Structures are given as C-alpha cells and as structure tokens.
Amino acid sequence: MTKVLAIAVTVLISVSTTAQAAKVTVEDLMKLRSIMDVRISPDGESVAYVVSTPSLERNAHEAAIYLVPARGGQPQRVAEGTRVFAPRVPTPKLRWSPDGASVCFLGLAGDKPQVFAVAPSGGEARPLTKAPEGVSAYEWAPDGKSLAFLTRDPASEEEQRQKKDNSFVIHVDAPERATRLWLQPLDGGAVRVLTPPGQYVDSFSWLPDGRDIVYSAAPIMGFAAQYATRLYAVPVSGGPPRAVVDRPGMNTSPQCSPDGNRVAFVSTNGRSELTASRSLAVTPVRGGGTPRTFGLNDAWVSDLVWARDSKSVYLLTNDGTFSSKENMFDQPIVRVWIEDGRAERIRGAVNFSPSISCDGRRLAYRAVEGRTMGDVFVLDAASGKTVKVTDVNPQLRDLELGELKSVKWRSFDGMEIWGLLLTPPGGKSGQRLPLLVYCHGGPGGGVTYGIFPQFMQTVGQVDPYGTEAMASAGFAVLFPMPRGGAGYGEAGQRAIINSWGEADYKDILAGVDDLIARGIADPDRLGVMGASYGGFLTDWIVTQTKRFKAASTAASISDLADQYFLSDGGDFMAEYFKKPWEARDSYFAHSPLNFAQNVTTPLLIQHGERDLRVPISNAWKFYRALKALGKTVEFDIYPRSSHLYYEPMLEREAMKRNLEWFVKWIKPGS
C-alpha cells in the first residue's frame, strides 16, 4: 500500500468512526435539557418557553427563557440577567401581558420569587411585585392594569420573635399561614388581599370583564388539601367571596370562558378518593345546579384551555377514552364541545403546557415524541397542522438510542396488560437479552414515551434509573403497566384495594414470562427496580420469588403501617386498606418487611434523607432486617433529598450506582 493510499484509508476510517452514533452513558443523560413551560403570545406570532439544563458545576437545574416565532425560526434568549425561580427545578409560570408588550415569569428578587416582566425585544427584566413572602402564582387582569397573585400570609411578630431567639415550637395540626389571593395595581396603588384567612387558595382565573376572579381553595393545607377544594368568586373591588361550586372532593384549576358565562375546572365529582377519576366539569359562573361532567370514560384530565368562541375546551388527558390499550402511553390533546359533549383527539403523543392565542388560531405546547426529551410545537387550530419550532437536544441525533415500543400480554386471569419495552441499540434478533423490570410509582402512575419514560413531565434526571444508559450497556428494560395504575380506568385502579402485591405482582411476572416465551428475555439474567410504589413492588417481588438476580429499590414502602402513621400523605393508605387498627392482618400480610427472610436477591436500597412522602424508616427497617438475616443488601442515603433527588450531582450518582449494580450482578455482556 502506498503512503498516500494508507493516509486516505486512515482518513476514511476516522470519518466513518466519527460519524457512527455513540452509545449512551450516564454523562450523556446528565446533559439533556428539558422544557419546563410554554406560552404563546396574545397575537399568536411568538412563543415563550423555558429550557432547564442540569449543571453539575452549580449542582442545580438552571433555567433560560427563550422566544421563538410561531412559524419557526431562530430562538432568542431574554432576561439573562434575572434568575428564574427554581426551588428544586425551574418554576417559571410564564405569562404574557394582555397587550403582548411583556413576557412575565417568576424570578428571584433576593431570596423570594417575584413577578418579573421583560420586553420581547430584550433588555433588563423589571420586578412587578414585592410580596414579603414571595409569589407562587399570578395572572394579568384582562385590561393589563393590575396583577392578581398568590402569596403566603407573613409570620406574626410573635412567631418572628420566637424564630429569632430560637424559642419557636412547631405545634402539630395548628393552622398553617394561609396562601391567599392579592391584587397588585400597576399604577402604584396599594396591594389588597381579596380572600379570607381560612382559605388556602391553589389556583384562579379572571373573568373577562375584570370585575371578578374565580378561584379554588381548601380549608386545609397538605397532601389531602387537593381533595377538599371548592370554587369561589370574589369581586376585585372588594367584598366577601361567594361559592360557585360547593361540594366535597377535588374542584380545582378553574378556567373562565372567554364569554364570561361559564367556568371549566377539574373535578372528582363530589368524591374525595385518591382513585376517583379527575374529570372535566363545567358550570355557570353564577353557580346554581350540579356542574356538568364530561367523564371521557374515566379519563384523568388536566391543563384546561378554552377555545376562543367559548364552545369547546382543549385539555390534556391520560387514561379513559383516548389513553387506553396501545394509546395508554400517550397524554393527548383532546377537544371537548360543551353543548353535545362530543370529544375529539386533536394531537397524540405526550403533551404538556398548552396555551392558545387570543384569536384561537394557534395552540402552542410541549410534545414528547418517541425517543426525545420534548420540544415546542405550534398547532394550527383550523387545519390541524403542526410545526416543531425548537430543537433543544440536537445531540440526541449523535447517540445510538434503543428502541422503545409498546407490548401486551395476558395475565393470570386473562386480563390484557400493556407495557413498554426498551431494547438495546443495534440488537440482533433471536438473541436473548438480560431484562430489567422497571416498576412505576403511584400506585396510580404510569409510563410514557420519552428518554425518561416515567418522568417526562419534569426534568428527566430525577429518575434514578437511567434506562437509556442501561440499554446501551446491553439490557432490555420492561416498563409494565399492571392493574392498579393508569390505563385501565377507575376500575383498574381500584382493583388493588386491600391487595397490593397480589394481582399487580402477577401482572408483572406474566409480562416477564411472555418475553421469555417469545425468546426476548434471558430467564437467567433478570433484574427488577422501582421507586415509591414501584419500590414497594420491588421489595415485594424479591420476597415472593427467587427469579431475579439483582434488584434496586428507591423511596420504597416496606411497612404499610409506617406509611399510614408517618407519611405526609398517609391518609390515602386507609383508602386501600382501612386504618391499621381496623385491618391489622391485611397490613401485615401485604408488607414486604414481614417476609424479609425469603429474600435471596442482592438488593440495593436508595432513599432520600428528608423524604416525607415515604419516610426513610421504611428503608431502615428493611435494611436492618435483611442485614440481620445475612442477606446481600446495601443501603445508600441521599443527603438533603426528599422523595425525588433534585441535585444534579446526586441524580448522576444514583443513575451511575444503579447501572453499576446491575452490571455487577447480571453481567449483561456475558
């Protein structure tokens, strides 16, 4: 071979190697960006959105606000000099002023979140509020002359004194300081409170004439508050609120129609159960009679947006009519016509954060398609055509991603069960694969399409299991959707009442057996993992079968009684099992802790130090029992962390630890 030819061959090989897609690593996953909010301008010509980027250097998820033409074009960053409010992840609450002259967001003024405004053309953002306790939500008045916002009541002078001299004591069940609705005139007038101290306001909407605000509020705070919300209307000029919807259960997220006649909201229709469907409800603003419900066959709805003619509502939904069987992994945009109840699926895939232009021509939203992290799309309401206007993770095209597809199987009783199956990139047909089973949280949760299938609604890195990196390491991953979770309607969710770890466990094992029978999974190389309720199922599975070679459990429930007594959401356990003293045998029979002696699977336990939803006592008890029994178990505590890990350094550590754990015990390349 001549020297020139040898050089040419070397160059070709180099170019070919460079062009090849790379395997996905945990480091790659930590570089992926998420869109946290989307808001279209009043004239429909521009879209504001926020991109969250995990920063290992600053150990935070950092936010940047961009504007992009609704027809597509080059994004422009604005408000670079102001930090977007991010208590754990960015919480921007993007809004446009009614005249389109300002983009507004929650930014930090000192250590408190306040409303800031910036011109679309750029320049410095300016604060619009100075609430002593900070702002948690806000909306512009229709005439653009004032803002309504939510803020917590300030501490009393006595409480401030006690905190200063360290004599402050927390009194359990003492009333919390209320979150109330305030009015901020933008002409320099005095700020006024509109709602009484006994109501904890969670959301609100202006009537188009600007005279009244409809809001939802509960008489309590905490996990159960969402199931005790009523709707009220309060005059902006002052005066007592009047009830619009006064019934038990969830009545929240009000949206007033553009004609001012009706209010749409999310409701459990008078029921306070965790498993009650969250339906679309509509009622006259002046109240009277029972609100009309649009159930969509047990659909759980959210993110309501009125069409500008006030004849229909756009909403997001999972479960029910438009999210079952092969579509149960979608969160589609659905349009419901108020007069006849007709419903139409407008946009499939997994969608978030919809907003509509003032003329109703365009709808902007975030959509997660296939193997992506999500981008901003704009829908033409008349034609149904969509335009993708962002590309926030172009590096995904340079990575060799696995294939994610829906699968189904028959369970022990013949019920059809669905799930997602992620297979390694470049996999060869006919080759049995090591399989990891990823149990989702909830129980009423589920999975969707995306790079982090369980956490596409937020920054994906809160997922402790970097499944895309696991696929690149040679693992297949099954994301089962057993009964008890989303996808099977309310009856499916209620199917595990008083029976956690029974039919749901069998549904999962049936899926594993199906993949083995189809020649996909290697029966000798099985692993299982999950967090929260998925952690419960993981704990339960390793106490019931010896089939799995390794397991990882996070934020997991091992003792059901502890979950009732110690969790901030412990009351929901009574919905499934009654109270512990009313059902001692059932609590015992369904707690993995009581079967620790059966475990043969090496188990990694992970838990946040400050987890209030699933107290860390669950992890300590299971670890101590397994350790005393001589089982193979390791326990990692994540400092400063709650139910999820929000610090990028800890998120990376969790993903790396889990990947290394399964590689160690299952050896995917063997």
Image: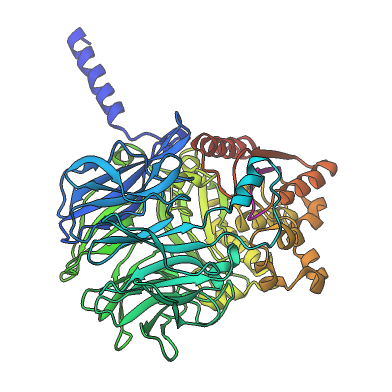
Tell me the residue at 31%/84% (across/down): 338
Q: Which range is magenta?
A: 602-614
- Position of residue 377 measured from the top left corner of the image (x, y, whole percent): 25, 56
Q: Position of residue 421 (x, y in %)?
A: 47, 55
Task: Find the residue positioned furthest to the top.
Answer: 3
The question of residue 501 being in magenta is answered with no
Q: Residue drawn 59% across and 51% down?
A: 157
Q: Nearer the viewer, residue 167 or 460?
A: 167
Picture quadrant of residue 279: bottom left
Estimate the x, y position of residue 487 in percent, counting from the top left: 49, 70
Quarter of the image with the C terminus in it: top right
The image quadrant of residue 315 is bottom left
Q: Position of residue 312 (x, y in %)?
A: 27, 79
Residue 492 in the image: above or below residue 203: below
Residue at the limit of the structure toward the right, as seen here? 628
59 to the left or right of 83: right
Q: Is residue 90 visible?
A: no
Q: State left or right for residue 509 relative to residue 93.
A: right
Q: Is residue 613 magenta?
A: yes
Q: Quadrant of the N terminus?
A: top left
In the rendered image of this protein, does residue 198 appear above or below residue 640?
below
Is 298 left, or right, of 127 in this rendering?
Answer: right
